[in-house]
Image (cartoon, rainbow, N blue to C red):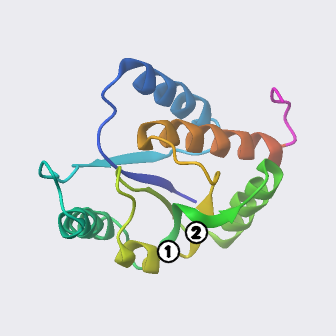
């Protein structure tokens, strides 16, 4: 199973880059994940709802261009299903058994386009709260790492 994390925007702050680097290093024992950073679309000052929708659509096109038809797509969405860490580990294990490549998709600051959400095989939420998309990348990688630790019955700080 190949894990792809497709996300909008670059990590600007060193502390986010350092955290991602650390979890990518840890994940190397279980998988060889790839992070694809896509450019954020520019939002005009005093943007209208139509401007915001255009940004989501443009970013969505970029995201969809990175997804292969055979990939299993998990989008991070506020209205997605919530899992416990063991439940997420079960999902990862199930996907490993299927042999599918998995794309985790983190949208930009405005969220995901309808087209990306429609392409999703599984909509997942970490909380009803909204988090910065930079932080979500770190949280997602940590939970993927935690999932592999659970699958392999290895200790990890609780």
Task: Give SS at disc 1.
Answer: loop
Q: Is residue 131 left or right of residue 65?
A: right
21 to 54, vertically: above or below: above
Report crowding for label 2: few under 14, some 14 to 19, many 20 or more residues within 10 A (C-alpha).
Answer: many
Q: Residue 26, located in which quarter of the rendered image? A: top right
Majority secondary structure of the magenta segment?
A: loop
* Residue 41, horizontal then vertical, whole percent: 18, 54
What residue is rendered at 66% in x and 72% in y? 98
Q: Which residue is mark 1?
A: 120
User: Range of the magenta residues?
Assistant: 153-158
Q: CA distance from mark 2 to mark 1?
A: 6 Å
From what the image shows, is residue 154 above or below residue 97?
A: above
Viewer-proximal residue among 97 and 84: 84
> For mark 2, what is the residue?
123
Q: Is residue 70 visible?
A: no
Q: Is residue 72 left or right of residue 11?
A: right
- Identify the mark at residue 81; answer none if there is no mark: none
| Residue 17 showing in the rendered view | yes
Residue 112, image x, y percentages: 38, 64
* Mark 2 vs 1: CB contact within 8 A: yes
In what quadrant of the picture does the N terminus appear?
bottom right
* Residue 13 within the segment the image draws in magenta: no
Q: Residue at x 57, y 36 (%)?
A: 28
Percent across and percent down for residue 9 are 29, 44
Number of numbered discs on residues? 2
Report the residue at 75% width, 58% height from top.
83
Q: Crowdedness of circle 1 by 10 Å Cα count: few (<14), some, many (20+)?
A: some
Q: Is residue 126 above or below residue 52?
A: above
Figure quadrant of the C terminus: top right
- Relative horizontal placement of residue 15, taking residue 81 as reference (left or right): left
């Amino acid at each position: 199973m190949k894990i792809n994390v497709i996300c909008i925007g670059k990590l600007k702050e060193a502390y986010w880059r350092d955290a991602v680097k650390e979890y990518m290093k840890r994940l190397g024992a279980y998988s060889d994940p790839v992070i694809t950073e896509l450019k954020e679309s520019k939002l005009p000052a005093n943007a209208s709802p139509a401007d915001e929708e255009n940004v989501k659509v443009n970013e969505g096109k970029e995201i969809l261009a990175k997804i292969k038809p055979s990939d299993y797509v998990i989008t991070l969405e506020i209205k997605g299903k919530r899992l416990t860490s063991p439940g997420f580990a079960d999902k990862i294990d199930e996907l490993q058994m299927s042999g599918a490549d998995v794309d985790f998709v983190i949208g930009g600051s405005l969220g995901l386009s309808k087209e990306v959400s429609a392409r999703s095989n599984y909509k997942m939420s970490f909380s009803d709260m909204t988090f910065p998309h930079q932080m979500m990348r770190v949280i997602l990688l940590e939970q993927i790492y935690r999932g592999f630790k659970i699958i392999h019955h290895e200790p990890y700080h609780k």
